[in-house]
Amino acid sequence: MNLTQNTTKIYFDVASIRKDFPILSRTVNGRPLVYFDNAATTQKPQVVIDAITKYYTHQNSNIHRGVHYLSQVATQAYEDSREKIRAFINAEKNHEVIFTKGTTDGINLVANGFGRKFIGAGDEIVISELEHHSNIVPWQMLCEEKGAVLRVAPINEVGEIVMEELLKLLSPRTKLVAISHVSNALGSVNPIKEIIKKAHDLNIPVLIDGAQAIQHTKVDVQDLDCDFYVFSGHKLFASTGVGILYGKEEFLNKMNPYQGGGDMIKTVTFEKTTYNELPHKFEAGTPHIEGGITLGTAIDYVNSIGLENISAYEQELLEYATEKLSQLEGIRFIGTAKEKASVISFLIDGVHPYDLGVILDKMGIAIRTGHHCTQPLMQKFNIPGTARASFAFYNTKEEVDVFIASVIKAAAMLK
Ligand code: 7TS
């Protein structure tokens, strides 16, 4: 077996893993692709691509409504996938797993279904300074509508939430805490279990934005005891346009539906509509059927490698890349929390991150530059943006070496 060279430990055969992702063998601008923009979206393994083709070749039909054979096949595959997702996050009940369009959609669902019903004038919602816009703006919109107040827990200079300050914000006025599990711009892993515990001591429900965690680490919603957990399929090696809202049954049952339409009703008359049971109450209209089914395929694939192996390997890549980058002249890391996922945000003295991104692209290297949909966080660090390299388990130390050599070349051109 051609096992990974250069690693002190062997977690899996990365060379054969890379063969599972056809896009990784293409070139960009005449160079082998180095894809370091995994925090934006991940690449798809052949099994997921095949499952998409299989769906449209053999299974395509609308779900939850047909007596005919294909509708039953598609419905079964969709519901089987829901069960895989339930097991993946260890939710207690299948109907606590709601299909959404993605993380943004899941947060908006909670802001509308929970927030508009249970949050009123003078109530408070607590978030943190490192949130993505999608965990800021829906709460601001709700606050504006209801006269509620958004309170923001600060982070320290390395990009960790300051717990004492967050705890000071919790009061009887707090009706929800909404915090990311992992920061997309800094990579910080937040102490969500502790935050959830402290909030629950005061009977405050907690939503966790897991967009940057679910692909890197084992998430157990019962162990975390979170009330809501949201994530996107496309960051977990599946399609865009599909995601998951996990919610505790007791909350989901109390909440209003977010959207009205087909599938979410029990009975409709012009006078009154009664709503369907969970999970359908929150799944109005024809969903992203193929996306939902193949999210299950992506989860099977991740399970076949093992999230513990993925985590350990990615941590090694992170350490390797951080160590190599730290040797560059004029480098400044933005986000050096003790607990980090495989995301590195950085600046180089005298080099605009955008220019660096453009030159790296010419060399076949994909990174993201800019504010990463975290403008308030960039304001906190007093910078317009960063260059961000984010790794997945199919990346290698050899790619990191190419990246570092290219950054050195680009910086020399730009200085
Ligand atoms: N929350 C976090 C922490 C994220 O990183 C993102 C996307 C979202 C929410 C929104 O997810 P969506 O799938 O609904 O769009 N983050 C990024 C990123 O870092 N670069 O591109 C998208």
Image: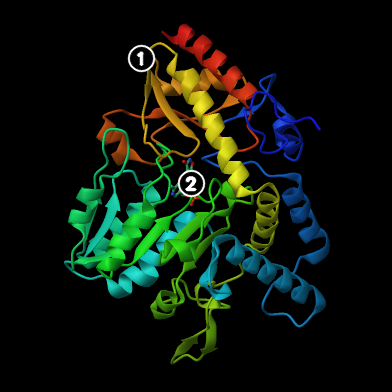
Q: Is mark 1 within 8 Å of ligand 1?
A: no
Q: What element carries label 2?
A: loop
- Say what amino acid the circle numbered 1 marks: Asp
Q: Residues within 10 Å of mark 2 (few under 14, many from 20)?
A: many
Name the mark nearer the viewer: 1 or 2: 2
Q: Residue 115 carries which label?
A: none
Position of 331 compared to 215: left or right? left
* Residue 328, image x, y percentages: 44, 13
Q: Residues within 10 Å of mark 1 (few under 14, many from 20)?
A: few
Spatial CA distance of label 1 from label 2 is 28 Å
Identify the residue position indicated by label 2 in the image.
Answer: 212
**Camera-side residue: 265 or 324?**
324
Q: Relative to 156, does residue 289 appear above or below in the rendering?
A: below
Q: Which mark is residue 349?
A: 1
Mark 1 or mark 2: whose residue is earlier in sequence: 2
* Residue 330, image x, y percentages: 37, 13
Q: Is mark 2 within 8 Å of ligand 1?
A: yes
* Total marks placed: 2
- Say what amino acid the circle numbered 2 marks: Gln
Q: Colour scheme of this structure image?
A: rainbow
